[in-house]
Amino acid sequence: MLALTVKPRTPGSLAVLEVPDPEPGPGELLVEGVALGVCGTDVEISLGDYGTAPDGRERLVLGHESLGRVRTAPEGSGFAAGDLVVGVVRRPDPEPCPACAHGEFDMCRNNRYTERGIEARDGFGSQLWSIETDYAVKLSPSLSTVGVLMEPTTVVAKAWEQIDKINTRSWQDPKRVLVTGAGPIGLLAALLGAQRGLQVHVLDRSTTGVKPRMVSALGGEYHHGDLDEVAKQVQPDIVIEATGSPEVAIGVVNLVSPAGIVCMTSVTPVGHMVEVDAGTLNRELVLENRVVFGSVNANLRHYRAAAEALAEADTTWLEQLITRRVPLAKAADAFERGADDIKVVIDL
């Protein structure tokens, strides 16, 4: 079969190669790959920034945003041939740490976890892949064209879960959410905010294209002006930061209402210096009872929540997130970001 592979920490090693077909073990599904989403993590691995091949191997099969159809399933597993599935990315560490032992492997304490397509496990960028039934999640058949959005949706499902938990620290009835950044994470965060009945506001640099229309279709308001001015207008109770801009990440901290919550979902570049009035930052956090937290990755609970959120969403709206599809043979084209790209998908 063909697979999208890379030699980790070796720039320029991205290649589609012939590799052996997987042989599913007991309790595993054999899955036909349908599509693979490409995100910033994949690009960084392809540039040699990080990544680890499986033990004894030089190359890693890339890809963690999966979508496939079951070819074979163990009897009594709850799966059947033809089922639409995605694979969970992370696996608990072998010890395990307390978080992994309680199923919260997205919160692993000792960093001995492994991840499909990233850290010591082959990913889903192949025409066939196998997976343990405990780490496969079934999707509604209605999501056959957009189910590849599942993994990024798990990221925001977790973020919203954590926001909901933080809200229980005091009486809080949030009305308005401001999402900074209208990439896949930002737009999916806005979707889940709209599903919660919140007034949704999205701030992004784009002034044309599909993004403003997508926010409007959610019943939200799209902004592209100055961050401070937008925040004064919106007065958000919740901010979800998804730009990856250090200036914006720092800027949003003091822009929420009293007892407001800021969730950081983007990973900003290292070494980018921003001048900050640390005294004011600390003072406002304390006196206004604000919370700032980061959220990344997802566990099984978040995958199931994401599957429900996608099934509830308008498929036509979701399809607009996928702005470009490329065949596996031309997978390298997916790593060259276009000006209007939101989510690029490789057809397997």
Image: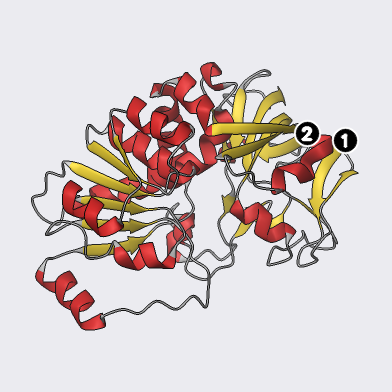
Q: Quadrant of residue 12?
A: bottom right
Q: CA distance from mark 2 to mark 1?
A: 7 Å
Q: Which residue is mark 2?
A: 128
Q: How far from the left and from the top, in percent, is residue 192?
A: 34, 36
- Res. 212 in view: yes
Quarter placement of the C terminus: top right
Residue displayed at 44% across by 62% down: 245
| Residue 303 shown left or right of residue 37 in the figure | left
Residue 281 x/y as whole percent: 22, 75
The disc labelled 1 sits on which kind of residue? Answer: Met
Query: Relative to 231, is 135 on the left or the right?
Result: right
Q: Secondary structure at mark 1?
A: loop
Q: Where, by quadrant of the figure, is residue 66 drawn?
A: top right
- Disc number at residue 1? 1
Percent across and percent down for residue 30 are: 74, 31
Q: As shown in the figure, which amino acid type bears the numbered disc 2?
A: Leu
* Picture disc at residue 240: none
Q: SS for tag 2?
A: strand
Check the image and report above or below for 31 versus 249.
above
Please state if 236 lies on the left or on the right of 147 as rendered: left
The answer to whether mark 2 and mark 1 are in CB contact below 8 A is: yes
